[in-house]
Image (spheres, rainbow, N blue to C red):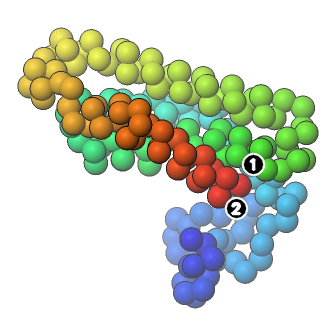
Amino acid sequence: LISAAQDLSLEEGGGSLCVLGRSPFSKEKLSNQELRQVVRRQTIRGLTAWCNLLVAAGMAAVGLAINSSATVVASMLISPLMSPIIQLSFAMIDSVLRSEGGFMTNAFRDFFVATLGCVCVGLLLCPAFVWAEVDRSWSWPTEEMESRTHVYRTLMPGTVISVISGIGVA
């Protein structure tokens, strides 16, 4: 996307992403060492990241409960879960990051703990939805719930697409 924006000669605007103090519209590329530094900084540790993660998990739960794919997609936009996924992808591709003691283990642990946090949000909200009779008024399981639980139709292809995307990012 950044190269496409550069090719279009777009001007730098307010709120644009800067990496290591560089504009995304800069022609200057990051060195491998600088890129590794950016990947190392990706983290879901800290209050802000966990607040974003828990809000995103809550939004996803509401989206599934009320059959709203727009809400589920919106939750993905604010979720910081991509940080450990990017770290794992780069660690698989880059021998320097892979050889760093504990880097891959920490990234996997962060991913596992964050995923577990999302599952816990779902487990806490589900009884609240049942108490509020959301299950009856939206006829659970909703289409959103069903469409995300078919192993061969959605989960397996989604997993393959995710792995390929992660490798592409790396």
Report the mark closest to the observer, 1 or 2.
1
Viewer-proximal residue, 112 or 34? 112
Image position, residue 110 (x, y; %)? 66, 29
Say whether residue 95 is left or right of residue 19. Answer: right
Viewer-proximal residue, 151 or 21? 151
Quadrant of the rendering where the C terminus is positioned: bottom right
Say whether residue 68 is left or right of residue 3. Answer: left
The dot on residue 90 is 1
The dot on residue 15 is none
Image position, residue 36 (x, y; %)? 81, 52
Say whether residue 32 is left or right of residue 7. Answer: right
Image position, residue 160 (x, y; %)? 55, 45
**Tag 1: residue type?**
Phe
> Would you call the spot at circle 2 few (<14 residues within 10 Å), some (14-19), or many (20 or more)?
few
Q: Which residue is painted at 52% across and 75% down in the image?
A: 13
Q: How many marks?
A: 2
Q: Earlier in the sequence, mark 1 or mark 2?
A: 2
> Would you call the spot at circle 1 few (<14 residues within 10 Å), some (14-19), or many (20 or more)?
many
Q: Can the viewer see residue 50?
A: yes
Q: Which residue is painted at 73% across and 64% down in the image?
A: 21
- Which residue is the extreme one toward the left? 137
What is the distance, in whole Å, between disc 1 and disc 2 at their CAs?
A: 17 Å
Say whether residue 103 is left or right of residue 13. Answer: right
The dot on residue 19 is 2
Q: Are marks 1 and 2 in contact (CB under 8 Å)?
A: no
Say above or below: 20 vs 161. Answer: below
Image position, residue 96 (x, y; %)? 90, 47
Q: Which residue is painted at 25% across and 15% down in the image?
A: 128
**Tag 2: residue type?**
Val
